[in-house]
Amino acid sequence: METIQSLIIKNLHEGGAGSEAQITIQLRNSFPGIGGELKTEQAVVSALREPYSAPPDTGARLFLKHTILKKLDDFFIRTNQYFFQHITRPLGSITQNEKEKEGYLYEWVYGRETFSWEYPQGDGQNIAVQLEEWSAFVSAFDLAGIDVNSDITDPDNGLISQNIIHQLYRTKDNTLNLCWKRIDFGSNSLIIHEEKLKSFLDDRRQILIDVLGLDRYELMILACRFLYQKINERELGQLDMLAREYRISSLRHKIAEHIII
């Protein structure tokens, strides 16, 4: 049996900073989080998001929020609301300790964040930039009570984008292709209307199970309870198991293993 290489956690570069948190780009093969620590054969370029001030469980809560968004993204694609994945994979979370701050990990996205929403024409008028699949993406998530359309422009210049990473950006294209990801799911950047989300999950229970599977549906339900309601010990144990299996699945392309610690 092959053995996994030694621990790799290497800071590569600053990934940016906002009003709530800072991002560090890391190469790592160790992913702590709900369900235990996972380790991959190959190191993964990841984003570590660390809030400036964070109460306990902030990292876990952001991981679960991101997980709900990711599974809804999968659902909307599989039901033909749009075609390209616009939410990255969440990979884990960190509970504050002596060595690390509270935070969570997700798949790093290469591309450009600051593109223009308008370009000037020769007649002195501006032409709006069309981002392919943006309207369908916003409409789909709005049905679930999630405002992905918020905080997508620079606060100092409303014509410049933020929190959308375009992966195949071409300068001065008035129509941008569908290769983009929406990022930053902090409370100041993306608001979830919990009652609307709960109704969406309840009303579409069967089709969500048919499309995503029972385990993923129950993971979303328990994630919502952890975030917005009370969760008992039995449910917490189930959430731990379901989140672990989901994280292994997300990292399966890197040959994930569970580490006994």
Image (tube, rainbow, N blue to C red):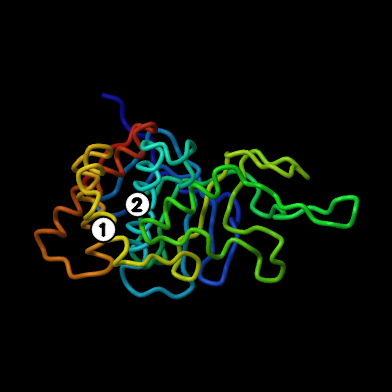
Q: Tag on residue 12?
A: none
Q: Are marks 2 and 1 in contact (CB under 8 Å)?
A: yes
x, y (%) of residue 95? Answer: 33, 64
How crowded pointer 1 is (Cα within 10 Å; few <14, some 14-19, many 20+) is rated as: many
In the rendered structure, the answer to whether residue 94 lies left or right of residue 213 reads right
Q: Quadrant of residue 230?
A: bottom left
Closest to the observer, 33 or 138: 138
Residue with the mark numbered 1: 223
Helix, strand, or loop for circle 1?
A: helix
What residue do we see at 19% from left, 50% from top?
218
**Whole-number angstrom distance, CA of label 2 to CA of label 1:** 8 Å
**Type of residue at label 2?**
Thr
User: Which quadrant holds the N terminus?
Assistant: top left
Percent x, y of residue 37? 29, 49
Q: Which residue is mark 2?
A: 67
Residue 125: x %, y % from top left = 84, 57
Q: Is residue 41 above or below residue 90?
A: above
Dividing the picture into quarters, in which one does residue 15 lie?
bottom right
Query: Residue placed farthest to the left in the image?
Result: 234
Could you tell whether 156 is left or right of 92 in the image?
right
Residue lying furthest top in this view?
A: 1
**112 or 79, nearer to the observer:** 79
The structure residue drawn at horizontal position 37% and vertical position 41%, both measured from the top left corner, is 74
Residue under the image location 44 percent in, 75 percent down:
53
- Name which residue type carries label 1: Ala
Residue name at image x 63 percent, y 44 percent: 111
Residue 218 in the figure: left or right of residue 257: left
